[in-house]
Each structure stands twice: as C-alpha cells, then as structure tokens.
Image (spheres, rainbow, N blue to C red):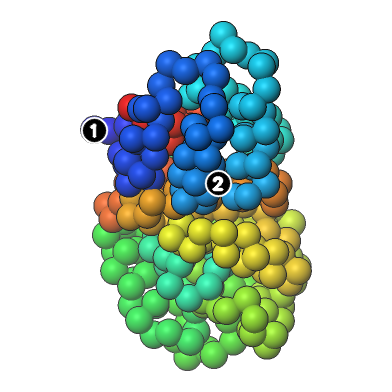
C-alpha cells in the first residue's frame, strides 16, 4: 500500500528524470556561474515551471543570499515564496461540479474522486450531466457499479442543467455527503458551450451555495492550461484544479504556475490508472518529488 508521498514521487518520475542530470551536476553547489544558470533555466522551462517563476529563480540564485543552502533547497524556498500557501487551506463543498475541455480526464477523475470520498466513509452520489456523449454515461455506470455508489443519469434528457439540478435535489434530499457532477467536455473557445456551463452552475446554485467547481487539466497541456483556466473562469468561478496524467508527462512543473499565477489551489493529482491513483495535492510532497529527489 503506497502512501500519498510515495504516489506523488512515483507520479512525478518522468518530470524528475527530465531534470535529474542537471540537478545532480549542481548538487551541493552554493554558487552558480553563468553556464550553470543557463542550463538550469533551460531545464526548468522544459519542465513547465513558467517564464515568470524561472526568471525569478535565476535572478535569486544569482545573488549571494542563502549560500548556506544547497541549490535544491534554494529553488524550493523560491518556489514556495512565489505561492500564497493559504490558498491550499481549502474545503471541498458538498456539491462538486467537474469541468474541463475534451479529453482532460473529467469522467475518470469524477469516478476516482468518488472512490476517494467513499474511502473516507462519505456517502457519495455521481451525477451524469454529460448529455452529449453516451459513452460518458456508460463509463460512469461501470464506475458506479464497481464503487457501489449511487448514480443519477437521465438519458432521456438532453438538458445537462436539468440533469444536474435533479441530481443535486435528489442528493440533498437523501443526505448524501458528496454529490459529484460530471459535465461534458467543452472547448474554452466555444461561446455556446461556455454559456451552457454557466447555466448549469446557476441552476445548481439555486439548490445550494455549498458548491466547489473543480477544473480538470491534462498536465501534458503545459502552459496552455493557464489560459484554459482563465477562459473557464470567465464563465463560472473555478475553485480548484485536478491535474491529471502527471505520471505520463515531463511537464509536471505546471502545477507551480497554476498556483502562483492563477492563485487557485490544486486539489488532486492523477498519478496513474488505478482507482486509488487520484491523490490529494500536497505542496511539500510535490516539491520533494519534483526537486528534492532529483538526484
């Protein structure tokens, strides 16, 4: 049985391996020359930490401060200073609206979140509000059966807002601890679909204000993920992020600009294909997997 720390470190293996040689060559150094800085800058950009943060790291490492710390420790300190750590003290609402673009892994993430909440002894209901893709409903039926959780799906309705409303109404009436709504994937450039998402949120808000909107981002997207969140956030308030497919990318550093530039918490990370491979995001574990173990 792997711990969350173990899974975080395993999930970041590809990104860590990408920067492994660079950090190994710099290990133990308290001063970086110009050549070292250029190498470090390139590898951190490739890992998708973002231009703004990498510039800050390079600038700080060029100074004479904290020479008593090694390079790994100094980079971690700089990264932490770029993040408002208070945003990581969040509470997931009773109703969770799962949103994102096509192919990011929303339906799977909704199911895995159900498994995680069920393991915490919470009573969970899944709501299939993707009325465009029949396969999404079928997929949720399989997950719900495996997890032994209730699923509300109205395959005769083509109105996702109506399905979401019915699901929340039923879940609240039956005292479910978590009501997780899977929505259809949509491109952030589609005005009609973004308006539809806004409608879903408004309809659900009529039943309760205890709502958390989680946006699912494919970690392979890299810096484009930032623009996706900004576009979705213009339609509905994005409260947190689920980063999926972290185990399959060398761009796992993208978690940092999500936190520092968007000031939105990462709530979960997807680090594998198994049911228990959706894990809570822990900044200390994450940095340990990304940098401290890069040797």
Provide the secondary structure element on which disc 2 rests. Answer: loop
Secondary structure at numbered mark 1: loop
Which residue carries the number 2 mark? 49
Q: Residue 1 got which mark?
A: 1
Dot 1 alpha-carbon crowd within 10 angstroms: few under 14, some 14 to 19, many 20 or more: few
The answer to whether residue 123 of the structure is visible from this angle is no
Q: Position of residue 162 (x, y in %)?
A: 62, 81
Q: Residue at x 29, y 69 (%)?
A: 142
Figure quadrant of the N terminus: top left
Above or below for 47 versus 244:
above
* CA distance for labels 1 and 2: 31 Å
The residue lying at 64 percent from left, 81 percent from top is 189
Whether residue 31 sits left or right of residue 292 in the image: it is right
Task: Assess disc 2: are there few (<14), some (14-19) or many (≥20) residues with their C-alpha within 10 Å of its C-alpha.
Answer: many
Q: Residue furthest front?
A: 34
- In the image, is 211 to the left or to the right of 224? right
Q: Position of residue 227 (x, y in %)?
A: 65, 65
Left or right of 30? Residue 203 is right
């Amino acid at each position: 049985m792997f711990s969350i720390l173990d899974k975080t470190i395993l999930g970041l293996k590809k990104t860590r391996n990408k920067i492994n040689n660079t950090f190994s060559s710099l290990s133990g150094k308290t001063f970086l020359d110009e050549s070292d800085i250029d190498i470090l800058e390139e590898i951190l950009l490739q890992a998708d930490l973002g231009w703004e943060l990498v510039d800050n790291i390079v600038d700080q490492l060029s100074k004479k401060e904290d020479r008593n710390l090694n390079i790994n420790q100094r980079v971690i300190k700089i990264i932490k200073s770029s993040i408002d750590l208070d945003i990581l003290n969040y509470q997931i609402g009773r109703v969770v609206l799962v949103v994102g673009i096509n192919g990011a892994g929303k339906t799977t993430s909704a199911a895995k979140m159900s498994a995680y909440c069920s393991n915490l002894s919470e009573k969970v209901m899944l709501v299939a509000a993707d009325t465009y893709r029949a396969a999404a409903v079928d997929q949720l039926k399989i997950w719900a059966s495996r997890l032994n959780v209730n699923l509300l799906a109205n395959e005769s309705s083509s109105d996702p807002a109506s399905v979401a409303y019915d699901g929340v109404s039923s879940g609240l009436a039956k005292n479910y601890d978590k009501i997780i709504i899977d929505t259809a994937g949509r491109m952030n450039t589609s005005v009609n679909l973004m308006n539809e998402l806004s409608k879903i949120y408004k309809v659900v808000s009529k039943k309760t204000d205890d709502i958390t909107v989680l946006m699912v981002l494919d970690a392979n997207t890299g810096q484009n993920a930032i623009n996706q969140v900004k576009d979705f956030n213009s339609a509905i308030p994005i409260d947190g992020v689920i980063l999926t497919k972290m185990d399959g990318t060398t761009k796992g550093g993208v978690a940092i600009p999500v936190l520092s530039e968007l000031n939105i918490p990462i709530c979960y990370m997807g680090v594998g294909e198994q049911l228990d491979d959706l894990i809570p995001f822990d900044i200390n574990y994450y940095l340990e997997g990304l940098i401290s173990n890069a040797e």
